[in-house]
Amino acid sequence: MLAHGIKTLGVLGAGQMGTGIALVAALRAKIPRVLLHDRDPAQIRSGLSLMDKLLAKDVGKGRITEGEAKDARGRVVVIGEEGVKGLRDVDMVVEAVSESLPLKQSIFASFAAELRPDAILASNTSSISITKIAAAAIPQGVSAASAEGIKSAGRVVGLHFFNPVPVMKLVELISALQTTPETLDRARAFAGACGKEVTTSKDVPGFVSNALLMPFINEAIMCLEKGTATRDDIDTTLKLGMNHPMGPLQLADFIGLDTCLAIQQTLYDGTRDSKYRPCVLLERMVDARWLGKKSGRGFYVYD
Ligand code: CAA
């Protein structure tokens, strides 16, 4: 296997994705220090409690020993108010915040200002252009075409994990226009060490995964909107007829309806193709803040 050479990893964002990435990095890849940061302390608390629960479950099922669980948990260090400055020594950082280009651009600009110039900068984005994110990682005042500009943007890569991260076997690797082959190799090696199969995609809106998944989910919501079938019949058709683990409406709730809408908007804006236009019902559900499982209500109601 290729060497990723990562001794200290930073993970920015302690939501479901960031927590899962930190966990597989500590438990599977055995990265000695995994620094986890989120600007919301409540998010950190719930992330760590999920991690503890998942480790305890693995111990209970005899998959790992108590010692292995304790070692993995011990490798995860929370970075508090210091924020991105607290990640200054990392060999690689994975950004896993919400799907907003301006937010990601400001984060990658702060990575460029605070992190070592040789650190790999990965984004877990599920649809936003890695090329745009990479352009934001060039220090202020440096030309994108200069040797320094090319080097700065060349260390940015898309590393798209899937939810739930400890369970899903795939990572989609996305090369920006600027990404260097060395960055790609190290990111691929890191994902492999986390126990994941890696596929690669060009930097197109939605990459391979969401260019295919989101129109499918959108069509299912349109079926519901048009009254073609009930929620349960739509989901059951796909679950039992096509052997999908979840129906598309349940999956949309699981991903988060705001995330589905943000990805669909990126697909629509990025391609200008009407086949990607988000349906009105999805927009209204997000307007109502019915965001799926995480908010307690989406197409289904959760306790
Ligand atoms: N975090 C960690 N582990 C979880 C979990 C979570 N949030 N939810 C479930 N699991 C684990 C369970 O603990 C269980 O593990 P064990 O085998 O160790 O007991 C395992 O998953 C199976 O869980 P369950 O038996 O409770 O339930 P299930 O068999 O119905 O499986 C599921 C749950 C794995 C989520 C399954 O329904 C599934 O695969 N659903 C589809 C998930 C999917 O498509 N994910 C991709 C979404 S798209 C995305 O992430 C990217 C994007 O860009 C939008």
Image (spheres, rainbow, N blue to C red):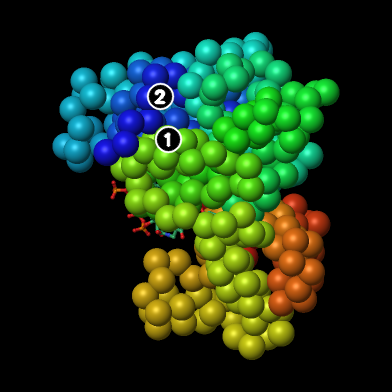
Residue at the farthest bottom position: 228
- Position of the N terminus, as image quadrant, is top left
| x and y percentages locating residue 102 in the rendered image | 79, 39
Occupied quadrant, residue 221:
bottom right
The x, y position of residue 33, in whole percent, is 41, 17
Amino acid bearing label 1: Arg
Residue 73 appears left or right of 1 = right
Q: Measuring 35% from the left and 46% from the top, which residue is drawn there? A: 196
The answer to whether 300 is drawn above or below residue 46 in the figure is below
* Mark 1 residue's CB less than 8 Å from ligand 1: no
Circle 1/circle 2 CB separation < 8 Å: yes
Of the numbered discs in the image, which one, if any, rests on residue 6?
Answer: 2
Q: Dot 1, crowdedness within 10 Å: few (<14), some or many (≥20)?
A: some
Q: Nearer the viewer, residue 219 or 108?
A: 108
Give the spatial CA distance, label 1 vs label 2. 9 Å
Residue at 42% over, 55% down:
199
Residue sitting nearer the eye, 301 or 273: 273
Q: Nearer the viewer, mark 1 or mark 2?
A: 1
Q: Amino acid at mark 2?
A: Ile
Secondary structure at badge 2 equals loop
How many residues crowd mark 2 within 10 Å: few (<14), some (14–19), many (20+)? many
Circle on res. 186: 1
- Left/right placement of residue 195 relative to residue 97 reads left
Quadrant of the rendered structure where residue 85 is?
top right
42 lies above or below 216: above
Q: Helix, strand or loop at disc 1?
A: helix
Q: Relative to 279, does residue 32 appear above or below in the rendering?
A: above
